[in-house]
Image (cartoon, grey):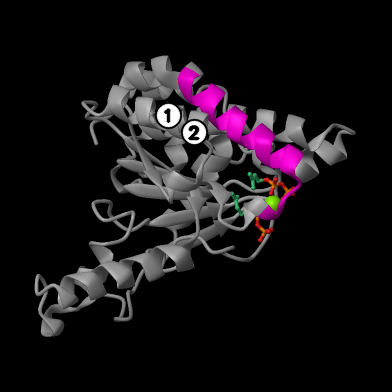
Amino acid sequence: MKRDEEKLGLYFVNPPEDVSLASIDLDRVPSHISLIMDGNGRWAKSRGLDRSQGHVAGVRSLREIITASVRLGVDCLSAYAFSTENWRRPQEEVDLLMALFANTLLRELPLFHRENVRLRFLGDLEGLPETTRDTFREGLDETASHTGMTLALAVNYGSRAEIARAARLVAQDVATGRLALEDVDEHAVASRLYTRDLPDPELLIRTSGELRLSNYLLWQLAYTEFYVSDKFWPDFDRWDLLRAVGSFQGRDRRFGGVTS
Ligand code: IPE
Ligand code: IPE
Ligand code: MG
């Protein structure tokens, strides 16, 4: 995606010692970066705060990473905000998160307009409280004509449920004769996932040091490069994003073949 070089330089001023804009190759920035934003609760606990304050602080980080990604020319940024398993949390925390999603989205619409960001959701929106769902629909409508970076938020998302849903849609199309059995291939499945029109992530970042996927994009991450940061999500900033991109650029991606 096109970059505004001047804005880019201004956004990455005063770098820390170990990383700078000059340390990455701007022609090889991953086109799709995906985030597992983890560690809000532990961040809050380490400061003697309530978990909810960790989630509020996490929104700040996401805002910074959205802007940094736009500046770098990333085509698509996806982020895991709430999993199908997160309903297991105390009701109070679930309620807070749902309200936070709705309020934040409305508040950030000017940012999406200014930065030409198009919103997408991955997951089952029908399972969300009505006010949250309505706000999400409003966000989708308001940003539908934007042509810049796509921001795909995974909310009430679970990869196994997503794949089972795709299998159901395939079965339905075969049963009704719209799809021939011999045409059931990888494309037939991929085109029925929530990510159907998005490229697979090139880089996955997980914060707070956990080495697991927690039911996130199991299909789409088949050949994605992983980067794990020990920082809690609310501490993850634009420089950490550059560190992740730098690490990505040092990888030898073979996709099962051999290095050329
Ligand atoms: C990630 O932070 C945010 C969501 C899952 C909504 P956590 O809430 O999982 O924080 P930790 O992992 O308990 O520290
Ligand atoms: C993954 O984090 C989900 C999100 C970041 C939204 P969790 O905190 O739910 O994952 P586990 O429970 O540690 O695997
Ligand atoms: Mg967690």
Q: Which residues are magenta?
A: 88-106
Q: Please determine whether, in this image, residue 145 is positioned above or below residue 69.
A: above
Q: Amino acid at mark 1?
A: Asp
Residue 192, position as x, y percentages in the image: 26, 62
Residue 34, position as x, y percentages in the image: 45, 50
What is the spatial separation of the Cα atoms under label 1 and label 2, in whole angstroms?
6 Å
Q: Amino acid at mark 2?
A: Glu
Residue 167, position as x, y percentages in the image: 32, 72
**Magenta span contains residue 64:** no
Q: Quadrant of the N terminus?
A: top left
Q: Please determine whether, in this image, residue 21 is positioned above or below residue 197.
A: above
Mark 1, residue position: 134
State yes or no: discs 1 and 2 in contact (Cβ < 8 Å): yes
Foreground pick, 61 / 17? 61
Give the number of the disc on residue 217.
none
Question: Is 51 placed left or right of 30 in the picture?
Answer: right
Question: Can you tell me which quadrant of the image ligand 2 is in?
Answer: bottom right
Q: Please determine whether, in this image, residue 125 is positioned above or below residue 161.
A: above
Determine whether the residue tagged by mark 2 lies in a helix, strand or loop: helix
Q: Residue at x 37, y 34 (%)?
A: 72
Q: Residue at x 73, y 43 (%)?
A: 91
Q: How many marks?
A: 2
In the rendered image, which quarter is residue 47 located in?
Answer: top right
Mark 2, residue position: 130
Would residue 16 be seen by someone viewing this image from the given angle?
no
Q: Quadrant of the C terminus?
A: bottom left
Foreground pick, 16 / 181? 181
